[in-house]
Amino acid sequence: MKEKELTSTSGYAFIAAILVLWIFGGMIAAGAQAGLLATILFFVGTTLSMGLTVINPNEAAVATFFGEYVGTIRHNGLRWVNPLYRRRKISLRARNLNGPKLKVNDKMGNPIEIAAVVVWHVQDTAQASFEVDNYQKFVEIQSEAAIRKLAGMYCYDIIEDEDAEITLRDGSGKINEMLEHELTERLVRAGVGIHEARISHLAYSPEIAGAMLQRQQASAVVAARKQIVDGAVGMVEMALAKLSEKGIVHLDEERKAAMVSNLLVVLCGEKSVSPVINAGTLYN
């Protein structure tokens, strides 16, 4: 079922006609001999007044006639339609859905907490009214289902899967696009359009948060140490090359090994080193 526009008439002219009917009916009712005519005028005026409806900005009214959908009124202001039409107003404004924190498992089976914020609006009033039972509840349930599905397709972080191109934590831009696409496909049958969908909360579940934090810290320490060692080796290589180039001192292989060991201790150590002066030689 698709939305179709219902032609409506400005209600101001009908207000004037209704007032005229009621005034004449009252004047006639004042006479003792025209009660039937006065009743008819009052009845016609009251019936016409039932066709008046006010449509606010970003609002629509879905009209049915004895169970049959006849169209949607989208013109703002005071409008008049057939008094026998049953009208139901629907807001077309953008709405926020702040989803609850969901506990789900990511691709690797780790329990995580995830939540999303969805900005949506009704774009087809006929589908929203007749294709689903309650379109607002439909949006809530389908949004939760989409988030659960997305969380199970990807890992929380690249530490868990080094070959992963997209993760829930690092690929936020792509993840949001995929969430928006998934919601659009699920909610199109309810006549709902998606403005924006974003992950608002993402964290490990409390029972594994401590262990995962230690794992992340260990990985960070290993990465930092690797960078320090790479830099220290380069500096030692440069120092030996400079000493050899300028001819300051000639070192045999054993002395080079001792010098490399000392330099690496100085450059890679976490604390300041205390120099030890050797008054003799390496062999004494």
Image (cartoon, rainbow, N blue to C red):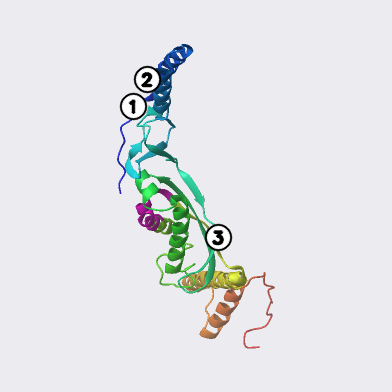
Instruction: Please say whether residue 26 is one of the residues in the magenta stretch.
Output: no
At 57% from the left edge and 75% from the top edge, which residue is drawn? Answer: 264
Kindly identify which residue carries mark 2: 13
Report the mark closest to the observer, 2 or 3. Answer: 2
Amino acid type shown at disc 1: Thr
Quarter containing the C terminus: bottom right
Most prominent secondary structure in the magenta stretch? helix
Instruction: Please say whether residue 193 is one of the residues in the magenta stretch.
Output: yes
Asked whether 126 or 119 is in front, the reply is 126
Residue 101 is labelled as 3
Asked if marks 2 and 1 touch (Cβ < 8 Å), the reply is yes
Asked whether 36 or 128 is in front, the reply is 36
Disc 2 from disc 3: Cα separation: 53 Å
In primary-sequence order, the first of circles 3 and 1 is: 1
In primary-sequence order, the first of circles 2 and 3 is: 2
Rendered view: 195 above or below 253 = above
Rendered view: 6 above or below 151 = above
Amino acid type shown at disc 3: Lys
